[in-house]
Amino acid sequence: MSYSNITVSPSNSSTDTSIPNTSSSSSASVSLSSKPLSGWHHSLAGGIGGLAGAIVTAPFDVIRTRLQSSQSVQFADISSKPSSPFSFLYRSRTLSVVRKTFITEGIAGFYLGLVPNLLGIIPSRAIQFASYTQTKKYLIAANSNVESSAIHVLSGISSGLITATLTNPIWVIKTRMQLGSYKNTLDCLIKTLKNESVKGLYNGITASYLGIIEISIQWALYEKFKSIAAKSDYARSNTSISSTWLSYLGSATASKLLASLIAYPHEVLRTRMRQMPMHYIDPITNTKHFGSKYSSLLRSCRFIYIEEGIRGFYGGLTPHLFKTVPNAAVMFVTFEFISDFMKS
């Protein structure tokens, strides 16, 4: 694999970070300024990448959702056990949820909500990657063909806004499937519409918009890390295919990890706002109610802080990282692989 056509500029604002093109021939030339793929190519590559990542990390998604919800205690089995080398399994809430899920629901319990998750992941990632790449292309053209981190951030914001608006109903159903007792996805959809109308399918949409912060940070960091890796490989004359894929993997992993740590609280808020109506006690007035406890973003923040403190905004962080970081790595590497394949 050759990088002979790459031009490395000392200025970050003019660095071309397009995906290198690979082919089956070891002597094939790669150009960062090659003609970009069309929108549907990016949609296909993004959808396949999202599919691969979702299947691989589905168990982590179930555990994360249960730990983020206000019902996390019922999914855990933390009890006093005799001191033993394995007592940590009972003290750790995360491991306790894993243990109880396996005992009460078996392996299938770790894949609850997978169908609506896949139905959401495939179009969501297809929309995300296509909207990001197309927005970036137009912004670069409008900026005299100069690429910059600001363009990456703006493209990420546009991508996140479009994706969140179009796919929120699917994520509501997925979340409720993982938390509630429904016969199947259709049963969950019918009951949600019957009890809450169409509005119920958009619970958590404001928190989803907050997630745009994470998406924009992730894209900006991914592009930056990928650019740095490409420059480093070029400077060291290391243009092997394995080096290219390792740069994709490392860039995706590092960018998702940092973005998740910065923006994680919105994940908890979004999960709470998507929960089904329930009986609850208002922590401010101490009165009993039935309905959506976390009906707005501000209300959710107040209730979580009063009842659980700052720690409540970070519930499920460990399984979240175990799920999203490998997911992003698999998804982005698959996206790059499919894109390179279609280019060749």
Image: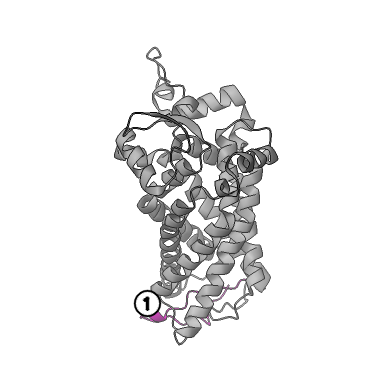
Residue at 52% of width from left, 74% of height from top?
Answer: 135
Left or right of 167 in this view: 233? left
Is residue 204 placed above or below 150 in the rendered structure?
Answer: above
Name the quadrant of the C terminus.
Answer: bottom right
| Pointer 1 residue | 12
Q: Relative to the observer, which residue lies in front, 177 or 91?
A: 177
Taking the spot 43% from the left edge, 74% from the top edge, the residue there is 151
Residue 70: give x, y in percent of width and height: 44, 34
Nearer the observer, 33 or 30: 33
| Residue 12 is inside the magenta segment | yes
Whether 129 is drawn above or below 303: the answer is below
Residue under the image location 60 percent in, 39 percent down: 195
Q: How is the image coloured?
A: one colour
Few, some or many C-alpha atoms within 10 Å of disc 1 (few <14, some 14-19, many ≥20)?
some
Task: Residue at 56% x, 65% y: name it.
Answer: 129
Q: Residue placed farthest to the top in the image?
A: 82
Furthest-bottom residue in view?
144
Query: Taking 333 as reference, is 319 left or right?
Result: left
Would you say the magenta stretch is mainly helix, strand or loop? loop
Residue 23 in view: no
Q: Nearer the viewer, residue 261 or 341?
A: 261
Identify whether 255 is placed above or below 309: below
Magenta residue span: 1-24
Q: Quick check: can you spot residue 292?
A: yes
Q: Measured from the top left, where is residue 290 in percent x and y? A: 48, 32
Q: Position of residue 330 (x, y in %)?
A: 56, 53
Whether 301 is among the magenta residues is: no
Q: Amino acid at mark 1?
A: Asn
Q: Position of residue 147 (x, y in %)?
A: 44, 79
Q: Is residue 193 left or right of residue 94?
A: right
